[in-house]
Amino acid sequence: MILTGRRKQFLQKLIDLYNKTNMPVHYETLARAIGVSKWTAYDMLKELEKLGCLTRDYAVNPGETGRSQIVFQPTAKASSLFEQPRSEVIDPEEWHQIKTKVLALLNSLKSSSLSDAVQKVMEEIPKVQVRVAFCAYIIGLLLVYLRKLGGRTESLIKSLVQHAPTNEMRMTMFVGTVLGTIIQTMNHEMGIEVTDLIGRYLKSITDLSDRERRMLSDFLYESLA
């Protein structure tokens, strides 16, 4: 098989979608973005996988406990075909809307059980369109866990993070301390999914601009206050 114009179209769009969040793309998401049936998209992704342009994985379907769905992400070979400049930094108004939405969601979950709150946040993560929004939701997810820890543990983590010397260190320290505290209490399936998301979060942080990291750090600081 060769990389025809149509295959390039599908691959380019998948890379676009992947680059926005660093998350693997479900074939239905790609189908909607291009305007084809999900089966057409799936067949094309299988062809691209055979060419070594994609790898597949299985992610838990947030709407169906225990059910997984097939997702794809580009290989280094595919990414090298489309050397893309990083997307523009989001404007202040868009960032304000993202912050407002995440904070409103967290406030609505204060009285929910831990499992219900985590599930609600996890359902929102696949919907985000830009890296900094993805990072905000991951922070939101860990804030849910931090609130449930409560007491002295919550106070100590807040103090540690708020006194971090740099924006990037604040965000990575927050993730590391909360994840390290809660990981032993997660069930196996949830633990794998959360740690995978955290890995993508850490990669996304390095891809953000200095301005975006500052915006995200300020968001975390305000959320912990």
Image (tube, rainbow, N blue to C red):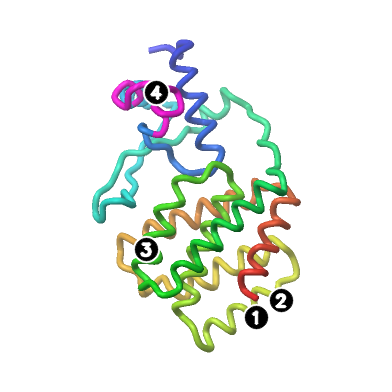
Q: Residues within 10 Å of mark 1 (few under 14, many from 20)?
A: few
Q: Amino acid at mark 2?
A: His
For the point 47% across and 24% down, the residue is: 11
Q: Main secondary structure of the magenta part?
A: helix
Q: Which mark is residue 191?
A: 3
Vertical arrangement, residue 24 with respect to residue 109, above or below: above
* Residue 159's disc number: 1
> Which residue sits at x=54%, y=41%?
129
Circle 4 Cα neighbour tier, 10 Å, few/some/many (<14 / 14–19 / ≥20): many
Distance from Cα at disc 2 to Cα at disc 1: 6 Å
Residue type at numbered disc 3:
Gly
Residue 13 in the image: state x and y as whole percent.
50, 26
Residue 133 drawn at (x, y percent): 58, 50
**Residue under circle 2?**
163
Residue 84: where, in percent of width, then height? 64, 29
- Which one is closest to the eye, mark 3 or mark 1? 1
